[in-house]
Image: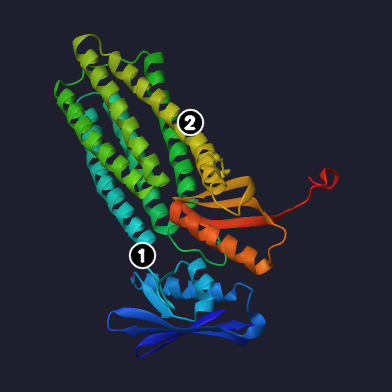
Amino acid sequence: MIKRKKFYNGVIFDYFFNNKKIGTCTLLKYQHQYQIEKIFILKEYRFSDLGSKLLKEVINYLVDIDIDEVQIKAPHELKLFFIKNGFKEVEHEIFIAKNLLKDKKRMKEGLFVTFVTLFLNVFLALVKITGGYLGNSKALIADGIHTISDIGTSIIVFFTLKYSSQPHDSEHPFGHGKLEYISSLIVSLVMILSGWEIFYDNFFSLYNKEIFVKPNFLLIYISAFTIIIKFFMYKYKLKEAKRLNSNALLSDAIEHRQDIISSIAVLIGIGSAIYINPLFDPLAGIVVSIYMFKEGWELLKESSHLIMDIQDKKFIEEIEFYLCSLKNIHNVHGILLQPVGNKCNLYFHVRLDENITIKESYSIITDLVIKLKNTFHSLDQVIIQVDPLFNTTNEENSL
């Protein structure tokens, strides 16, 4: 357990284990800058990753109070410890951790994007459903219901972005990023169910041979207006989803694209119902439902694959090519990726010369982890198993 104790210009973090204080960290504020004055773990409790957990608690506190960087002055022999925990040595024995608010900023930007499109979806749904009832168009009403499903999914995405960016904790050591995949899964199910509801309503209207009234001519303009608005919403959200590397925003953007195509089908159906036969209006509703079902099914498969840790073969090949270009690293194998939101964890095996010391091996692997994270910015945790590279000429004893 880590307890915080505030004083006039800083915070003390005390680490307790079995009611015994085993470590402490002092964080001081100098004007608008923060500095870790010291971090200490009792000798008998060192080398158990407790120092990293204590440091992570300090970083999480700084993120909560919107501080973007912190520095510490520490002995040079602790360099690997601080670099492993996201710090960079800027001067001799001075280490700085920057961009602490990167994930928090990403979350806020994603929430803003979602809020804007949520507001517009409410407006479009009201326009479509009201216009559909007043202008006698089942297809436009169906399109409005489709937009209501967009509102529901945007709300899901809103809360997903809010909680998926939370930092790692003891209960979620790999972070909360998979919430984005769960959100996409829910979005896909909403799309499928909404598609089925629209199909059912329009199909049985045709089956029961209802009398259809020719839609009002003004609905063509209303439908065209909603398509234009939705197109700009789609382009905006798609651009932000790619910039923020957000699967949740991307799934919501796909929902907008689906709404555009279904709205075009509605526009064609309304026009055909006015100039040819009113039956084209419910037929357009059926086209909308089929497209919703198809897109929902595709998104369901993609989300399920991500939850089940599907392997990105192209990315694995890039990592393997990079690793094989490094010296002292041999026989890279067993590369596995674990996607977690906009990040992924990396696991693999390498072989090092059997004659080097454990200390030398640790130094090589730590340096390798730093290089990988600096080269591939989407990597979060990198876990490497080291196997010996035997220097033997006896083929009978080699594997």
Q: In the image, is residue 252 above or below residue 264?
A: below
Amino acid found under the numbered disc labelled 2: Trp
Q: In the image, is residue 362 above or below residue 198?
A: below
* Residue at the (46%, 35%) spot, across then down: 299
Q: In the image, is residue 277 above or below residue 370?
A: above
Q: Residue furthest top?
A: 276
Amino acid found under the numbered disc labelled 1: Leu
* Residue at the (65%, 80%) spot, across then down: 45
- Hey, which quadrant is residue 229 in on the image? top left
Residue under pointer 2: 297
Residue under pointer 1: 101
Position of the C terminus by quadrant: top right
Spot occupied by residue 34 in the image (x, y as percentages of width and height): 35, 79
Of helix, strand and loop, which one carries label 2? Answer: helix
* Residue at the (32%, 58%) spot, across then down: 108
Spot occupied by residue 103 in the image (x, y as percentages of width and height): 39, 59
Residue 281 appears in the figure: yes
Position of the N terminus by quadrant: bottom right
Q: Do residues under tags 1 and 2 come within 8 Å of each other at their CB atoms?
A: no
Mark whose residue sits in front, 1 or 2: 1
